[in-house]
Image (cartoon, rainbow, N blue to C red):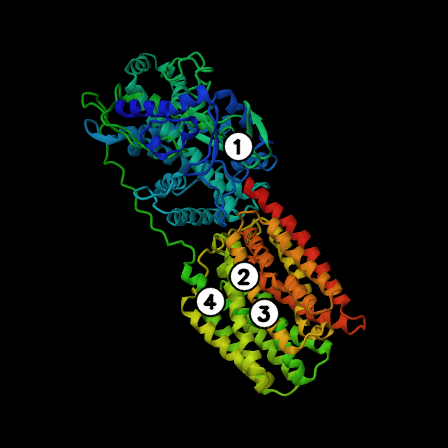
């Protein structure tokens, strides 16, 4: 309860502020219980209110009863998908799908699974158990002493009921309400959890516990508990770990907050309104009405959030597609235009159930009758024992705009009120320990980018490498293509099997192995003298580079801004390639030929990889939930996450684009003479192109997703297609330079977005880790196709056509994926 001085100050502030400056989501308004005058002004002057800036981003406030009902029932325009609270959506692979955050038909199917546990027949069977437990709790209260009602009664009764519903180990029951508090807390200094990482670690502790319970019951006979219901029902038996956790959290929070905070709220309200307390003592038949009035007066969940699926006009305001729309139940329950004298606490109201605390429409709280029954039973048992319970301290309100509840309420039962003797009070909750859960630090990302530059080095300098090999071994076009493909085939073999080893082995060990294999294979390539041996040596080189590149892809994919992270990664790869080309063309190739080239690359690769090695992590920081938590199906097999084909679409598109890109890239040196360009000029142009390629990666890192992903992706890939058009129509030096620059030199720009989109659509990292395989297989196929086309005697036009077709097909697929991700973010 707000102090009179605090409430008076808030009232003046609410009058003084401009409407645009009002932000009812401020945590201090909820911890001080002073949000009331701000909502009163919004209902009166701006019932559909837009807040442009808050701790939780911009949002619309719906503050009147009938408007809230209209939004709550219009799920086609106001979607529950993705998020149901004002808090910002999580986009790091730890999203919690739950049926309340779904739209029909999936919502309806999953809701039906748990509905039987709160059906009237089952509630009737549970009432005697609730009454017995409530009586025991009340009989153990310390009469004549000050104690915390929240801890001794509200939490304990709620926790015991939750343990019954889940058939949860009774000795660990306090974990349930603790996890509920963790999930609904806004992290910050001095709060229950101080950081998002700590919060996530505790949430995953909850998942670990519940997965064990799932695995115990999935192959047992179906039982009348929530876990067994979820494990056996067709609509939920194939849930992945995060969806299972989402529904568990929903049921815990729903079963905890309404009952717990309304039990506490009823004690507070009756003490603030002594005439109503006396009325209740004299007329205990008013308990059901008092319960409903308290649920309205308290409103234990202050809001629910929806997201607009399209532009929509509400009360003269245009809500845009993707806007966050918050239905403030706490305000609707005080709407003067619908509820008479709404700020008063009246236990015998004519229509006590006229409130929206449980929501409205298809998302109305599935356990509302159970909550009402628990509240009725506890008060029937209270009045049997204690004519009076006195509040002796100010309530401590929870600092949350979502859970409108109490952290503490000190009370005292007068010693003159006779009660039976009681055993010792309940033991305190054991502290919950948790493992650290964090993302990779910046130093790790920088080191990964350095090692990645080694992994991509031979591809980035492929024209120079293949040109040198062609001179040393007198290769024709088809053989040049096969040489390039042999290296990429080794890369592809390792990368394609990455899902089997990426999380099983120490990443530093893999980095050492990849460095050693690539360096030794390059040394072997420098020493051998036959075409066949060259293919084998480059195949081994590719395997080593594949190890390096795959490990670094796994690290970079965990970055919160994948588009920018991949842009920086690609730019760093180009930097090393420029150094390599400069060394090879200016100092090595003319003096020592291919042997010098291979040895130089071996030394450069080993040195850079070893510099980055010490900071490479031993393992993934963010272990995918479906790998960390092994749920079982009914037949006992592993349960994977729900199928998500979107990252596979991106992976296929990446493979396609790189087949065309590698085909052109491998033969840039070979086609130069047809433009009248000599070797030295090619070397200069190659370094310029690599420099521009690095800048393209940096441009992607700077721009990020501020213009979305579809637009920069389309610009980059259309410029690539324009490049081959230039190569086809202009056969001079300018045509070669401009065409190669547009087609290949700028490709790092759209490539950063390609990688970022695959990572974003694959929150668990199981498909992203295959990006090196897609790159390698596509790149290995490209030179072979290019060599075959060139050997057909039709000039270079078929090569250009292959490039244009593959890039266009890839563009279509990535455009679809970009729009999918944009829509998902909006929802």
Residue nearer the viewer, 130 or 151: 151
Disc 2/disc 4 C-alpha distance (Å): 29 Å
What whole-number distance in Å separates the C-alpha atoms at marks 1 and 4? 47 Å
From the viewer's perspective, is the residue at label 3 or at label 2 nearer? Answer: 2
Q: Secondary structure at mark 2?
A: helix
Q: Nearer the viewer, mark 2 or mark 4?
A: 2
Q: Do the residues under discs 2 and 4 have CB atoms within 8 angstroms? A: no
Report the mark closest to the observer, 2 or 1.
Answer: 2
Does 74 appear above or below 188?
above
> Can you say which quadrant of the picture contains the N terminus?
top left
Image-quadrant location for residue 656: bottom right
The residue beneath circle 4 is: 507
Mark 3 residue element: helix
Question: Which residue was labeled with disc 2?
Answer: 695
Q: Nearer the viewer, mark 3 or mark 4?
A: 3
Mark 1 Cα shell of 10 Å, populated few (<14), some (14-19), many (≥20): few
Tell me the tag on residue 436. none
Up/down of 229 relative to 651, above or below: above
Of the two numbered discs 2 and 1 on the same chain, state the one appearing first in sequence. Answer: 1
Q: Could one spot residue 68 in this view of the protein? A: yes
Q: Residue at x 26, y 18 (%)?
A: 387
Q: Nearer the viewer, residue 407 or 214?
A: 407
Where disc 1 sits, the SS reads: helix
Instruction: Estimate the spatial distance between the alpha carbons at disc 3 and disc 4, rounded to whole Å.
Output: 24 Å
Q: Residue at x 69, y 58 (%)?
A: 722
Whole-angstrom CA distance, mark 1 to mark 3, is 59 Å
**Which residue position is annotated with label 3?**
460
| Local secondary structure at mark 4 | helix
Decide if residue 305 is on the left or right side of residue 458.
left
CA separation in Å, label 2 and label 1: 57 Å
> Which residue was labeled with disc 1?
115
């Amino acid at each position: 309860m707000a102090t009179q001085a605090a409430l008076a100050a808030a009232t003046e502030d609410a009058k003084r502020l401009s409407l645009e400056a009002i932000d009812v989501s401020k945590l201090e308004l909820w911890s001080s219980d002073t949000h009331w005058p701000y909502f009163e002004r919004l209902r009166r002057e701006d019932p559909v209110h837009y807040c442009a800036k808050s701790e939780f981003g911009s949002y619309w406030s719906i503050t009147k009863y009938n408007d809230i009902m209209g939004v709550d029932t219009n799920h086609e325009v106001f979607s529950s998908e993705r998020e149901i609270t004002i808090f910002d959506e999580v986009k790091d692979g730890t999203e919690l799908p739950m049926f309340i955050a779904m739209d029909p038909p999936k919502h309806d199917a999953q809701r039906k699974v748990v509905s039987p546990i709160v059906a009237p027949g089952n509630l009737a069977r549970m009432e005697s158990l609730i009454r017995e437990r409530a009586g025991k709790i009340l009989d153990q209260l310390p009469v004549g002493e000050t104690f915390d009602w929240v801890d001794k009664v509200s939490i304990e009764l709620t926790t015991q009921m939750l343990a019954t519903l889940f058939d949860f180990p009774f000795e660990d029951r306090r974990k349930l309400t603790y996890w509920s508090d963790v999930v609904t807390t806004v992290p910050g200094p001095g709060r229950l959890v101080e950081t998002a990482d700590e919060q996530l670690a505790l949430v995953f502790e909850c998942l670990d516990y519940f997965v064990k319970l799932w695995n115990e019951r999935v192959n047992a006979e179906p039982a009348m508990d929530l876990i067994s219901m979820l494990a056996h029902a067709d609509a939920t038996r194939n849930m992945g770990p995060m969806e299972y956790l989402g529904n568990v959290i929903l049921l815990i929070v729903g079963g905890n907050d309404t009952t717990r905070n309304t039990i506490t709220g009823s004690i507070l309200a009756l003490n603030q309104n002594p005439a109503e307390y006396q009325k209740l003592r004299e007329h205990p038949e008013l308990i059901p009405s008092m319960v409903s009035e308290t649920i309205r007066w308290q409103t234990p969940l202050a809001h629910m959030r929806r997201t607009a699926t399209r532009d929509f006009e509400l009360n003269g305001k245009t809500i845009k597609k993707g806007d966050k729309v918050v239905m403030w139940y706490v305000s609707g329950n005080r709407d003067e235009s619908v509820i008479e004298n709404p700020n008063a606490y009246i236990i015998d109201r004519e229509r006590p159930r006229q409130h929206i605390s449980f929501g409205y429409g298809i998302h109305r709280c599935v356990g509302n009758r159970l909550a009402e029954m628990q509240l009725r039973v506890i008060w029937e048992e209270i009045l049997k024992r204690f004519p009076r319970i006195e509040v002796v301290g100010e309530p401590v309100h929870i600092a949350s705009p979502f859970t409108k509840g109490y952290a503490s309420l000190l009370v005292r039962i007068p010693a003159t009120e006779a009660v039976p003797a009681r055993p010792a009070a309940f033991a305190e909750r054991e502290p919950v320990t948790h493992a650290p859960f964090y993302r990779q630090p910046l130093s790790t990302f920088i080191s990964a980018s350095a090692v990645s530059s080694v992994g991509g080095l031979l591809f980035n300098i492929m024209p120079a490498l293949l040109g040198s090999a062609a001179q040393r071994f007198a290769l024709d076009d088809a053989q040049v293509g096969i040489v390039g493909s042999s290296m990429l085939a080794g890369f592809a073999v390792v990368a394609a099997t990455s899902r089997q080893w990426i999380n099983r082995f120490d990443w530093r060990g893999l980095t050492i192995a990849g460095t050693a294999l690539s360096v030794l294979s390059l040394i072997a390539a420098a020493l051998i003298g036959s075409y066949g041996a060259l293919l084998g040596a480059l195949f081994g080189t590719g395997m080593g580079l594949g190890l390096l590149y795959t490990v670094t892809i796994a690290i970079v994919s965990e970055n919160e801004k994948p588009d920018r992270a991949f842009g920086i990664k690609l730019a760093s790869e180009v930097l090393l390639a420029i150094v390599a080309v400069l060394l090879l063309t200016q100092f090595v190739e003319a003096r020592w030929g291919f042997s010098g080239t291979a040895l130089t690359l071996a030394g450069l690769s080993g040195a850079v990889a070893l510099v980055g090695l010490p900071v490479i992590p031993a393992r993934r920081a963010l272990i995918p939930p479906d790998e960390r938590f092994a749920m079982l199906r009914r037949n006992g097999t592993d349960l994977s996450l729900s199928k998500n084909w979107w990252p596979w679409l991106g992976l296929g598109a990446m493979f396609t684009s790189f087949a065309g890109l590698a085909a052109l890239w491998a033969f840039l040196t070979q086609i130069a003479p047809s433009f009248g360009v000599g070797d030295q000029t090619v070397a200069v142009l190659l370094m310029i192109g690599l420099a521009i390629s690095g800048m393209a990666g940096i441009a992607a890192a700077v721009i990020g997703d501020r213009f979305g992903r579809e637009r920069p992706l389309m610009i980059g890939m259309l410029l690539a297609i324009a490049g081959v058009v230039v190569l086809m129509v202009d056969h001079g030096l300018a045509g070669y330079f401009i065409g190669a620059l547009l087609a290949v030199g700028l490709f790092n720009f759209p490539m950063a977005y390609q990688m970022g989109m695959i990572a974003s659509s694959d929150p668990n990292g199981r498909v992203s880790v295959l990006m090196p395989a897609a790159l390698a297989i596509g790149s290995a196929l490209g030179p072979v196709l290019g060599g075959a086309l060139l050997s057909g005697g039709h000039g270079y036009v078929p090569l250009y056509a292959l490039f244009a077709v593959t890039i266009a097909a890839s563009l279509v697929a990535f455009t679809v994926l970009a729009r999918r991700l944009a829509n998902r973010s909006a929802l």
